[in-house]
Structures are given as structure tokens and as C-alpha cells.
């Protein structure tokens, strides 16, 4: 069952909610209400992509949900969504950029969980994958995010 909306409306909602979530991720000193909105928006964006998107949109949506939960120190849902992102990347051969971010999400979620061995293993996988990213701008963005797992600083 899905909402009675046309394709264009679902796509606009997916994009707008993804961007809202990203704005909240980058915001310093979020309120509790903003944290709640960040969770709701990330999940709602993924819902709309599930109707009109592709496996790439699904993987990126799962990655974003994982990031949100990691920021909020909620390891179990962060791991769940990071694993979903990884599975989508591997099943659909989505490329090294998104695969690297799936490993980054797993490293981040394991950091929240306190599983340092898995955090380090996934950082290494993310770094190995990042080296295969052709576009320098994308490689640098991925590397900046991988580095942020260790430092806890969200790159802007």
C-alpha cells in the first residue's frame, strides 16, 4: 500500500526530505525536536524513493538513515540500515563511491556500538574502495567522511 501521489510528487518529496535531513545533519546544536525531524525526514525520504527510485536511491537512503541514527548514538538501527545499504550496493553493483560509503556507514555504526575491531575493518574496506573511485572530487568527499568516523567531525 502506498500514498495516492503521482510520480513527480513522490520524487519531489524524496529529494526535499533527503535535503532537509542533510541540512539537519550539518546543523550544530540541534534541538530534540530537530533530532526527531531528522529521523522522520530520512525515513520518509527513503519511503518515497522506494516508490519512484532506483537501487542507487535506495542505497543512499539507507546510508542516510544509518548516518542519522549514528549521530544520535543509536547503534542498532545505524547498523541495520548500513547493512541494508551495503547489501544494495553489492547486489546491484552500484560502484565504488556508494560501496565506500556503505563501508563508512558500517564503520560509523560500529564506532557507536563500541565495536572497535569492526569499525577498523570497515574503515580499511572503505579506504580500499575509495582508492578505486575515479572522480577525484568524489574520492576526496568519501575520504573526508571516512576520516570523520575516527574524529567524530561531520564534514561540510
Image (cartoon, grey):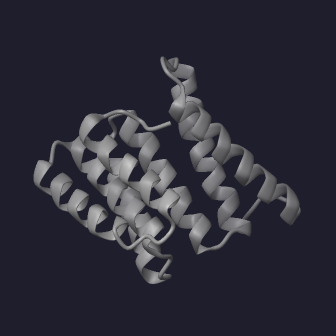
4 left or right, relative to 82: right
Q: Residue at x 78, y 59 (%)?
A: 11
Can residue 125 be seen in the rendering of this structure?
A: yes
Residue at 32% of width from left, 35% of height from top?
73
Viewer-closest of 6 and 53: 53
> Which residue is located at x 74 percent, y 62 percent?
2
- Classify the position of the N terminus by image quarter: bottom right
Taking the spot 47% from the left edge, 56% from the top edge, the residue there is: 63
Please provide percent x and percent y for residue 86. 39, 68
Q: Nearer the viewer, residue 78 or 4?
A: 78
Give 42 or 145, whichever is nearer the viewer: 145
Q: Where 21 falls versus 109 (above or below)?
A: above
Question: Most extreme residue toward the front, as rendered?
Answer: 136
Residue 99 is situated, as x and y percent measured from the top left of the image, at 41, 69
Total marks placed:
0
Q: Which one is in front, 47 or 12?
A: 12
Instruction: Tell me where residue 134 appears, x and y as whole percent.
Output: 47, 72
Amino acid at each position: 500500500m502506498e500514498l495516492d501521489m503521482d510520480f513527480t510528487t513522490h520524487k519531489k518529496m524524496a529529494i526535499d526530505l533527503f535535503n532537509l535531513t542533510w541540512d539537519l545533519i550539518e546543523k550544530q546544536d540541534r534541538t530534540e525536536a530537530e533530532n526527531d525531524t531528522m529521523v522522520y525526514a530520512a525515513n520518509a525520504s527513503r519511503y518515497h524513493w522506494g516508490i519512484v527510485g532506483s537501487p542507487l536511491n535506495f542505497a543512499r537512503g539507507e546510508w542516510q538513515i544509518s548516518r542519522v541514527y549514528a549521530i544520535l548514538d543509536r547503534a542498532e538501527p545505524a547498523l541495520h540500515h548500513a547493512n541494508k545499504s551495503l547489501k544494495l550496493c553489492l547486489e546491484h553493483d552500484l560502484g565504488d563511491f556508494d560501496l565506500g560509503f556503505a563501508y563508512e556507514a558500517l564503520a560509523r555504526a560500529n564506532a557507536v556500538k563500541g565495536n572497535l575491531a569492526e569499525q577498523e575493518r570497515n574503515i580499511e574496506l572503505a579506504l580500499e574502495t575509495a582508492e578505486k573511485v575515479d572522480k577525484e572530487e568524489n574520492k576526496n568527499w568519501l575520504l573526508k567522511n571516512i576520516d570523520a568516523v575516527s574524529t567524530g567531525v561531520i564534514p561540510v
